[in-house]
């Protein structure tokens, strides 16, 4: 009987493996949808691919830092009497998440000849020689067809929203996720003291008639404190060339003013920026955080396994000793589940004798 059961289990397992293999063979990998509409994909300069494009030049390392996934570039055509003529290009960069897209968006705005538009996890860069109405309609068509991403990947970064709005020169707001990008946007600090390898975020912005405000966000207050001390040492090394410096840390947030601030204004701006409860972190954590998480999971798993084995051992021992005791009693001609030698407390105050049948009942009245 046991061999038949084992044989059945083996056959069922083999059938399941066979079905999984068949399902694996029938799976199809669908190519991603194009980033541009058909009207922009027919020109001679059309190009599409994964990662940073070969023609992006010095921008390629920055796009990689921001997590570029794929791109597509196409020609816009303007109708004329005998056909159409090229009227500029439209390029779409798609990133892993909205954080990287925002960083690339703030950087790519450096060229005033281009129109840069942010849409979810995509950045659209266009250089069109069309009438404003035609250009707007074309870009609207591009935006409608872009991929939509939900969840944490679709959430824009919160750090830029902490910038005080008064006297802010919005065209100077820059957001960086890596040292190459931070250096390219003209950051006030050497990139190596910021700690981008610890998943830091950086925002820089200039204020009208004042100076530059730098905000840095770290995964934990401990990392913020460590790099805050490095930044303080660097500012002391720069001396008067850094301008009016006010440095403050609040939890994982580090605030720094540099440039032509009045001391009172610099102090006021760093004192009035505070973290809000909705701060989230949707970037990949550095390796040490994953290591700590793995250690915690391993410890909890070991505890659960130990408790489970202990419970199983307790049940096995109970069955073994209990069953053995019951078997011995049955072999002696006694009931398996009674103990006539046990005493029973009778609260009635009347004398009672032990019943020989093992029921333990006391006669009343």
Image (cartoon, rainbow, N blue to C red):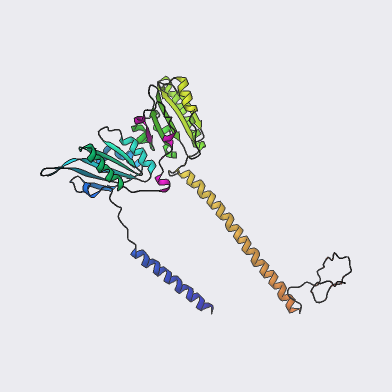
Q: Which residue is outermost to the left?
A: 82
Whether 236 is among the magenta residues is no
Quadrant of res 86: top left
Q: Which residue is outermost to the front?
A: 133
Could you tell whether 306 is left or right of 47 in the image?
right
Q: Residue at x 67, y 70 (%)?
A: 320
| Image label count | 0
Could you tell whether 174 is left or right of 278 in the image?
left
Front in this rendered view, residue 118 or 354: 118
227 vs 17: above or below: above
Quadrant of res 103: top left
Residue 271 x/y as whole percent = 50, 27
Can residue 52 be seen by looking at this rendering? no
Q: Residue at x 40, y 22 (%)?
A: 210
Residue 246 x/y as whole percent = 47, 24
Placement of the C terminus among the 4 image quadrants:
bottom right
293 vs 192: above or below: below
Whether 168 is among the magenta residues is yes
Q: Residue at x 43, y 38 (%)?
A: 158
Front in this rendered view, residue 127 or 244: 127
Residue 363 x/y as whole percent = 85, 73
Can residue 242 be seen by looking at this rendering? yes
Q: Which residues are magenta?
A: 150-175
Quadrant of res 85: top left
Could you tell whether 107 is left or right of 13 in the image?
left
Could you tell whether 324 is left or right of 159 in the image?
right
Q: Residue at x 59, y 54 (%)?
A: 303
Residue 218 x/y as whole percent = 46, 37
């Amino acid at each position: 009987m046991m061999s038949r059961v084992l044989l059945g289990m083996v056959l069922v397992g083999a059938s399941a493996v066979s079905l999984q293999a068949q399902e694996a063979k029938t799976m199809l990998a669908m190519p991603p949808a194009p980033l541009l509409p058909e009207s922009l994909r027919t020109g001679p300069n059309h190009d599409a691919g994964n990662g940073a494009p070969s023609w992006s030049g010095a921008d390629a390392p920055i796009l990689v830092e921001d997590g570029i996934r794929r791109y597509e570039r196409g020609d816009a055509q303007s109708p004329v009497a005998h056909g159409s003529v090229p009227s500029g290009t439209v390029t779409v960069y798609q990133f892993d998440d909205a954080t990287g897209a925002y960083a690339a968006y703030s950087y790519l705005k450096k060229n005033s000849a281009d129109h840069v538009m942010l849409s979810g996890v995509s950045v659209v860069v266009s250089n069109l020689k069309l009438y404003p109405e035609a250009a707007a309609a074309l870009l609207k068509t591009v935006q409608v067809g872009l991929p939509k991403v939900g969840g944490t990947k679709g959430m824009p970064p919160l750090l830029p929203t902490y910038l005080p709005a008064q006297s802010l020169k919005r065209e100077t707001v820059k957001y960086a996720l890596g040292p190459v990008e931070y250096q390219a946007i003209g950051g006030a600090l050497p990139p190596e003291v910021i700690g981008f390898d610890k998943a830091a975020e950086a925002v820089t912005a200039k204020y009208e008639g004042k100076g530059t405000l730098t905000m840095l966000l770290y995964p934990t207050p401990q990392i913020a404190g460590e790099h805050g001390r490095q930044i303080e040492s660097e500012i002391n090394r720069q001396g008067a060339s850094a301008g009016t410096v006010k440095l403050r840390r609040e939890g994982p947030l580090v605030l720094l003013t540099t440039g032509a601030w009045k001391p009172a204004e610099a102090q006021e701006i760093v004192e009035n920026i505070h973290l809000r409860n909705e701060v989230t972190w949707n970037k990949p954590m550095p390796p040490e955080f994953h290591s700590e998480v793995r250690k915690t999971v391993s410890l909890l798993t070991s505890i659960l396994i130990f408790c489970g084995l202990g419970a199983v051992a307790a049940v096995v021992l109970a069955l073994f000793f209990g069953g053995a005791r019951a078997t011995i009693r049955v072999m002696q001609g006694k009931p398996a589940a009674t103990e006539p030698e046990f005493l029973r407390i009778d609260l009635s105050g009347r004398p009672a004798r032990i019943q020989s049948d093992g029921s333990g009942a006391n006669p009343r009245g």
